[in-house]
Image (cartoon, coloured by chain):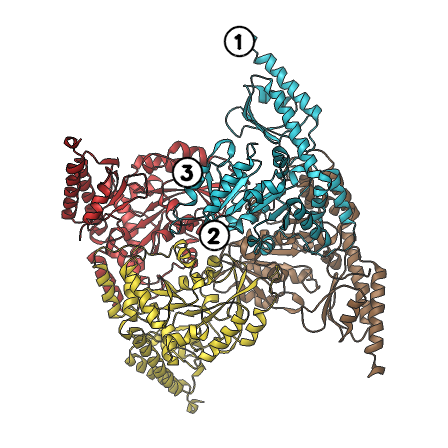
Chain colours: A cyan, B brown, C yellow, D red
Amino acid sequence: MKVAFTSDNIAGASEAVVEAIVSAAASGDAMPYGNDDSTALVTRMFAELFECEVDVFLVSTGTAANVLSLSAMTPQWGSVFCHEESHLLNDESSAPEFFTGGARLVGLGGCDAKINPQQLRKLVNQKVGDVHSCQPAALSLSQVTEVGSVYSLEEIKELTEIAKSAGIPTHMDGARFANAIVSLGCTPAEMTWKAGVDIVSFGATKNGAMAAEAIVVFNRTLTESLDIRRKRGGHLHSKMRLLSSQMIAYLSNDLWRKNASHANDMMTFLQDGLRQITSIKINTPAQANMLFCTLPEGMEQYLLEEGFAFYGGRWETGVVRFVTSFRTPKEGIEAFIESAQRFHDLYCSPARN
Amino acid sequence: MKVAFTSDNIAGASEAVVEAIVSAAASGDAMPYGNDDSTALVTRMFAELFECEVDVFLVSTGTAANVLSLSAMTPQWGSVFCHEESHLLNDESSAPEFFTGGARLVGLGGCDAKINPQQLRKLVNQKVGDVHSCQPAALSLSQVTEVGSVYSLEEIKELTEIAKSAGIPTHMDGARFANAIVSLGCTPAEMTWKAGVDIVSFGATKNGAMAAEAIVVFNRTLTESLDIRRKRGGHLHSKMRLLSSQMIAYLSNDLWRKNASHANDMMTFLQDGLRQITSIKINTPAQANMLFCTLPEGMEQYLLEEGFAFYGGRWETGVVRFVTSFRTPKEGIEAFIESAQRFHDLYCSPARN
Amino acid sequence: MKVAFTSDNIAGASEAVVEAIVSAAASGDAMPYGNDDSTALVTRMFAELFECEVDVFLVSTGTAANVLSLSAMTPQWGSVFCHEESHLLNDESSAPEFFTGGARLVGLGGCDAKINPQQLRKLVNQKVGDVHSCQPAALSLSQVTEVGSVYSLEEIKELTEIAKSAGIPTHMDGARFANAIVSLGCTPAEMTWKAGVDIVSFGATKNGAMAAEAIVVFNRTLTESLDIRRKRGGHLHSKMRLLSSQMIAYLSNDLWRKNASHANDMMTFLQDGLRQITSIKINTPAQANMLFCTLPEGMEQYLLEEGFAFYGGRWETGVVRFVTSFRTPKEGIEAFIESAQRFHDLYCSPARN
Amino acid sequence: MKVAFTSDNIAGASEAVVEAIVSAAASGDAMPYGNDDSTALVTRMFAELFECEVDVFLVSTGTAANVLSLSAMTPQWGSVFCHEESHLLNDESSAPEFFTGGARLVGLGGCDAKINPQQLRKLVNQKVGDVHSCQPAALSLSQVTEVGSVYSLEEIKELTEIAKSAGIPTHMDGARFANAIVSLGCTPAEMTWKAGVDIVSFGATKNGAMAAEAIVVFNRTLTESLDIRRKRGGHLHSKMRLLSSQMIAYLSNDLWRKNASHANDMMTFLQDGLRQITSIKINTPAQANMLFCTLPEGMEQYLLEEGFAFYGGRWETGVVRFVTSFRTPKEGIEAFIESAQRFHDLYCSPARN
């Protein structure tokens, strides 16, 4: 069985997370619907992590975290600005429209899947107060982006300030929050509320949990409706400790950071290796745990036949995506690079032409 | 720590379920979003359990199972007939309206929280085709009902036939499906499709799982949209094996039946005990694992102060609810009955008057 | 052609209204979407009529006026309290759910289609803050009610005070607003904001206009979203003068009051006549222009065959509804009473038994 | 008072339309909600006009016609393909999302506001069956387009065939349907169902009516829900004859065609005149009654100060829009051209440079 770079959602969970579930399941009676001690503890841990008071809503999927967050930020006739390549716009069906009651996602351009500030500035001030048009309502950033790049703190601030100047709040889709933090070497506070972010989808599922995401609210005027929206969306777990136990383990002993560090390190290792193979083109330099490359003709097929797994065929010809996770093995990457090199030597080296 | 009869959602999970989660989490890579082997196995196990081909959609909450089911059964202008005391109508916020896009729940009367067939017959044929009125669209039965009674197979058939005669499908809210099966001593097939049920919310969370519910579809014309509705509702887990592993364990070795048998037996034991205390009135004889009683003045407070836990104060004066679960201990019930008896002897016996 | 009591929406329009349309259509260019002079004039006329500042939104149907009003008053998870016999609940399809994004209508009981204050008091304070339940959000009164009765000012105040004490606003469905004013002999201000009403659907269509209804907002915190909600509902007319011209004519020279007076007078005349016929039972004494009676067996068929028109067969056996309008002719009523009397004499008089 | 080219919705109504309203208003009782003779007549007239059986739903605004049509064509998770400059996408608030229950408008590129067939072909086959993505559901064409161009019959066919090949139906936004027919010199049948269109928003308001639009359905499988959707949207008029009388007059004696011919002729006259002024750039040659030009610096302000009216300042610098209507006077255009010429001679002629 060879290494799979398909996604970071194909891995199971960290041992500490599993142990926490076991212990939660065995721990006797607990009040349902989040009125238990472990859920209260999660909120305190997030407050400490983010160095401020926060409201926290645990859910079991990233889509739920994103669209519930947005639903608290926009009226039904609002425009939500996001990147045209974002997961929100392309991979969550019409969940955003469903939960917001019909608000509109507006996809903006920008290099490396980062929103272009000039475009944003133009749009947040367009047709404000015109009943014939959707009204600027919210900004949503993906950090890590959909192509594996990472916004710098300055880039985040620039965008949130444009939003704030127009009176609209900012959401961060942090499905790979930990990978971004490790990449930037900053604190969670610096990457969020200190940079103008009002609410974050804090992902754990892709980085060591089985199913645990937290909506973390800094701008607590957004909190009011989230409690009831979560229930109304069918996302209020009765045995909440299933979610809270995972999150406690994830936040304890720096597990979230260690897991993300491993994933990012493995990506660096992979990228460095692929860079040596001149027939492979790095499309966007990986800053976290995801990489888009263009492979020479035939290499994709060759590697898949060798037993490696990754996504291709969804983008332009030859473009493939590699994702590393908290448990991608280094040896697996070495074997992968070797195979790629072998194909290159056989079919792409100058001597052959 | 004394026994709690608050709800069957306060318990953790059965050991076998926990072991299954552990083993799923440790089992290496698996394709995401239900494209893994364990999810396929769940479908096969349900087909065997129900003795027919079925489509299965796993979700993590009972509200999601109910409202997604309904959303596939009714147009946005439909009437969904349910009992006026049902969980669907009273305890799921406006999730039914949200997921159905604005269909209307119509609460019907009927003894012991069972829908009155005469009322149903009248309503399913009312104002059909009249654009000024909501259109009869679906029937939803709760089995076990909200007061702890259980529809007989004949009662189910009578209602589904009324529905069918008007061309509308039937949903069963089976949050306590296993408890009902044990109570009736029938097969899952007999209680569902053989009795005219088109789709069932098959609950496991209250009876040994941590968070695992299955939408089981018999009338597969209802399946088409459910796949996308689940995603759109944010209910498609990426690491589906968290749900499928629980369900496999729950369905294996008759765990579901054993757990429900214990819960029901404990309720019988509790009810028999309370029946001996003449100052306590049994409101609806428990047929599964839930009981509504009226306690004499002062007894509720006394028992709570003794450390027992249960819900009161939500219904008419003195009315309380007791729920037993797969792990309610017999000794706990004995202690509870003793306490109730003690209160009775002290304050309610004829000698005192 | 004999007189028809089917509804007050079967009549055409008052001459003054038609002349106003003609003159508006011929008046040259006008700014679209309500930015014209006549629409501004309508707002000033309503301010004068109601003796206070108001915001006004013209629409072309009563359903639009009602459901747009409610949509500004309730969150998507709110409960809207109305009478169980109200038009809102029974005759507007699922428009309320559609426009409110899934809020729930809760039908209350009460004699003569007037909401029972005790029931309301109980419900507005129930389960507040409980995420599992719809949240009390708005009260909607019909004045005239669905059975032709009229709330007294004291009755309105009692209900709005109960609502206010729970922090929820009150809507009045005034499809027959003018008929109620004439019946009570009070001012529009007294029947609305002075009695605690926050927003009213002011109907003109049934009383002399072709299609013109105004949402009149007293509690202007409700105004903010209505402008955009009207557009979003497809209810913002480009040539608004079609609506505003009708409303100007309707409000000018007391036309609204004269028309309603005629309709009410004709109902009094009809009711007085029917009261003489002992085989006819008056179900709810008419206070405005609508009457529900129970006819003796055979009379309904007889009158229909004579060429009169009215609704029957929708309620209990023998129950029929009569509605008079701004142009119901007195002679028509005389002929109708005569016919009813004739049937009575032939088939119902004591001599026959 | 000088001529206004602001929009074709600033004019009043044709005399024949006004007379029809007068006569309808005075015509005695009529059954409500479209169950009257004149509404039936409208359907027969449309069947004759389009040379086939059709279902017809009258509404009072173009937004209602468009979004109700779409709501019958797409599931809540569908993608509706339209041009990125279309009225549907830019000028109807979030009404499309509201009525479709959250479907997504996808704006395509293409010259002269006509959809690029290659882009459409790519998108209709993208991610079909993928629950993570919105599903291709409908195509919506604007004829006349938003910039005043007109699709040829071949262009319409090419697009509808691409749609059909992917199993999705086509809607035509015919707010200026008559202007397009006159421009193409074809029959209504040729421009719609013979060219693959399934449903059309047939506009009359901009071309001689006060408020009357018809949803005309050729593909009658789309009809089923429209009846109830119209009521649910608050768009079912009780006194339908207000709408039907306008439409009857509009369709009688070729009024629709005469009015559009006048508007188009006036635009030709205007365009020919402006073409003589070399400092004015025609952006898209007008094919119907709308024209986008770029004026030389200062000319816009000059013309506005002269008392002419038109829209500018909404697009790139100097870009203005002229719209002619069924009652734009030729003399007004002559005066306008003269003024423009005068400005040109004073400030833009080569001699000045």
Contact between marks 2 and 3 (CB within 8 A): the answer is no
D114 sits to left or right of B151: left
Question: SS class of the residue under badge 1?
Answer: loop
| Mark 2 vs mark 3: in front | 2
Q: CA distance from mark 3 to mark 1?
A: 47 Å
- Same subunit, tags 1 and 2: yes
- Same subunit, tags 2 and 3: no
Residue A271 position by quadrant: top right
Q: Chain of mark 2?
A: A
| Type of the residue with mark 1 | Asn
Q: Chain of mark 3?
A: D
Question: How crowded is the residue under tag 1: few (<14 C-alpha within 10 Å), some, or many (20+)?
Answer: few
| Type of the residue with mark 3 | Lys
Question: In the rendered image, which quarter contains the C terminus of chain B?
Answer: bottom right
Residue B247: x and y in percent read: 71, 46
Residue B277 has which mark?
none
Residue marked by disc 2: A76
Residue marked by disc 1: A353
Q: CA distance from mark 1 to mark 2?
A: 60 Å
Question: SS class of the residue under badge 3?
Answer: helix
Question: In the rendered image, which quarter contains the N terminus of chain B?
Answer: bottom right
Residue marked by disc 3: D164
Residue C226: x and y in percent read: 42, 59
Contact between marks 1 and 2 (CB within 8 A): the answer is no
| Type of the residue with mark 2 | Gln
Q: Is residue D60 above or below residue C177?
A: above
Residue D149: x and y in percent read: 28, 39
